[in-house]
Amino acid sequence: MWTLKRKTRGEALFDFLNTFGMVLICFVTIYPIWYVLVNSFNDGTDAMSGGIYWWPRQFSLDNFGAVFRSEGIMIAMGITVAKTLVGTVAHVFFTAMVAYAFSRKGLIGGKFYILMGTVTLFFGGGLIPTYLLIRDLHLLDNFLVYIIPVLFSFFDLIIFMTFFREIPEGLEEAARIDGANDWSIFLRIVLPVSMPVLATIALFHGVYQWNDYFTGMIYINNTDLQPIQTYLYRVVAESSSNQMMAAVPGGVTRSVTSQSIKLATMVVTTAPIVFAYPFLQKYFVKGMMIGSIKG
Amino acid sequence: MERKIETSVSDLPSERDGKARKWWKKLLGQRHLQTMALLGVAWMFIFNYIPMYGIIIAFKEYNIVDSIANAPWVGLDHFREFLQDDELGGVIRNTLGISLIKLVIGFPLPIIFALFLNELRSVRFKKTVQTISYLPHFLSWVILGGILATWLADVGIINNILMGLGLITEPISYLAEPKYFWGIVITSDIWKELGWSAIIYLAAMASVSPEQYEAATMDGAGRFQKMFYVTLPNIRPTIAILFILAVSGVLNSNFDQILVLRNSLNESASNVIDIYVYQTGIQQGRFSYSTAVGLLKSVIALILLLIANGVTKKLNNTSLF
């Protein structure tokens, strides 16, 4: 067998360099995140002199204490959790429902519906006309602006349809003979056998909801309705860290600086994604495959 | 025979009436399915098609208090204004500059990364590298902006290292100087998306049959030769399709990213079309003007997509549609 052939010197060198290069890429990927992590666990004032690369110099949990005591940050966190949960369930259910209807053979008007959706993949109204619509629908400063305008996605619908068409027809026929209508077939048969694709779309939409800062930035003025990413945007991009200090009860303590609170907030915001990541990995790889075959 | 008699007796319909009746019956049978479908159609009508209608304000002088229909027509005035605007040159330079560099460097890198990843012998190590390389894709640009601001700060790690090595004597405020902006945008984008963009290529590589590699080995091909003459030709259709999409997206700067990294000091290098549309529209309230600029951009992007699709179809026999 050719695989059992002794490696030549060139082959061995190639393998060594390739492995080394990959380790280097992994390091470059992880280290910037690690740097933020160790600095967030360090005393804020001490960190100002820099030089904390591998491990906290003066270990401290004060930054996180300050984050969890800040009412503004906690409210923003709550909004993010709420919009991610509600938005993801609503998006997945609604898009799957429409996709199920669109995927049925002989649906009257089906070709037209799909054409109508395909157009939206190539052309859209753009920023201002969308803004005017949201305003006219009274969704400004309204929690529902996080949910309704992203309830549906034609792109996700295509992924759902690809999956639904693979479901054996016999499964449906049997239920229909038992007198089930389309709603109960969708709810009791199609959804349960489609868990992998539901999980994939839920993951993608969940990450979108968790990470989106723009919606909160242009449609929401009420700070009690802004998600944590919008909150952080205002701190990071508008450099208004002082606002962050003001939000912390007791104001500036000796060991906490605006920079160290910022880092701790970033860590708290990112932690759920990093923790959930290994468990969800198998779903998004699968989802990318379905998407790429289609797209 | 029996059926024929039955229809002629029951209502003496013309054949057309029979068809219509059948159609109505079918529709009634689909009422649940149609409800589901029409909910989706209604959503698309409201959230996709009403904004498309709203584009007509690009040809009108729209103000907040009036309705879109009542606003007076101004023809192509807003387009003319944009083409004569002092900022036009800078906007085009920044948009195309950033996108073209991303295309030249950022497009091939994931392919090269995937090619080398594919050559790893240990499946476990390969999986580990993949897992780590996808991770940044799931971080938001706000978080990444925060990480970059920390790294590039006056007391950040970059300045610390450069000063430690004696390469600079004073810390540099990277995000405050336009000349560093493009570099920061392109590097951070590659850092975030390298692993993720490689997924599709890796999937295409997984479907290459092992016989092809065995045959190449018999012919005495080395690792590089196999990568170049076996793997690469096999993923050419995938590359072609992603290239079409990349070319049609050259007017799309990464809005989320640039909005986070820009500030008033680096404006001369960070003002791209999408930012300009956002600034004039949302911040200055020039709704009609901003819509006109956005429309011009979408139309050119659509034309680019068609051209790229046509060219790849000719050269490569692969196309998006």
Image: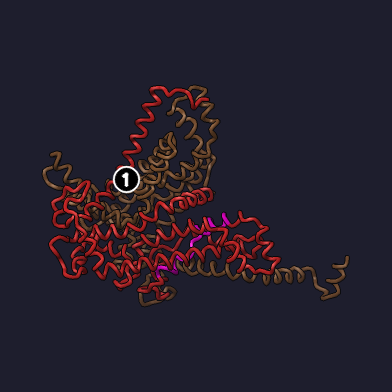
Chain colours: A red, B brown
**In the visual, does B201 lie left or right of B185?**
right
Would you name the residue on which mark 1 appears?
A: A29
Count the marks. 1
Q: Position of residue B193 (x, y in %)?
A: 37, 48
Q: Which residues are magenta?
A: A145-163
What residue occupies the far left of the structure in this picture? B169
Q: What residue appears at the point 33 percent right and 71 percent down from the top-left corner? A: A225
The answer to whether residue B302 is seen in the rendering is yes
Q: Position of residue B242 (x, y in %)?
A: 46, 45
* Chain holding disc 1: A
Q: Position of residue A60 (x, y in %)?
A: 19, 57
**In the visual, does A33 lie left or right of A292?**
left
Q: What residue appears at the point 28 percent right and 62 percent down from the top-left corner? A: A232
Quadrant of image for the N terminus of chain B: bottom right
The residue type indicated by label 1 comes to Thr
In this view, the residue in front, B1 or A55, is: A55
In this view, the residue in front, A249 or B95, is: A249
In this view, the residue in front, A131 or A54, is: A54
Residue A151 is a magenta residue: yes
Magenta: main secondary structure: helix
The answer to whether residue B177 is seen in the rendering is no
Mark 1 falls on what kind of element?
Answer: helix
Q: Is residue A171 above or below residue B21?
A: above
Q: Position of residue B47 (x, y in %)?
A: 47, 67
Q: What residue appears at the point 77 percent right and 70 percent down from the top-left corner? A: B18
Residue B222 is a magenta residue: no
Q: Is residue A16 above or below residue B183?
A: above
The crowding category of the residue bearing disc 1, from other C-alpha atoms within 10 Å (few below 14, some 14 to 19, many at least 20), is many
In this view, the residue in front, A145 or A137, is: A145
Q: What residue appears at the point 33 percent right and 57 percent down from the top-left corner? A: A271
**In the visual, does A221 lie left or right of B311?**
left
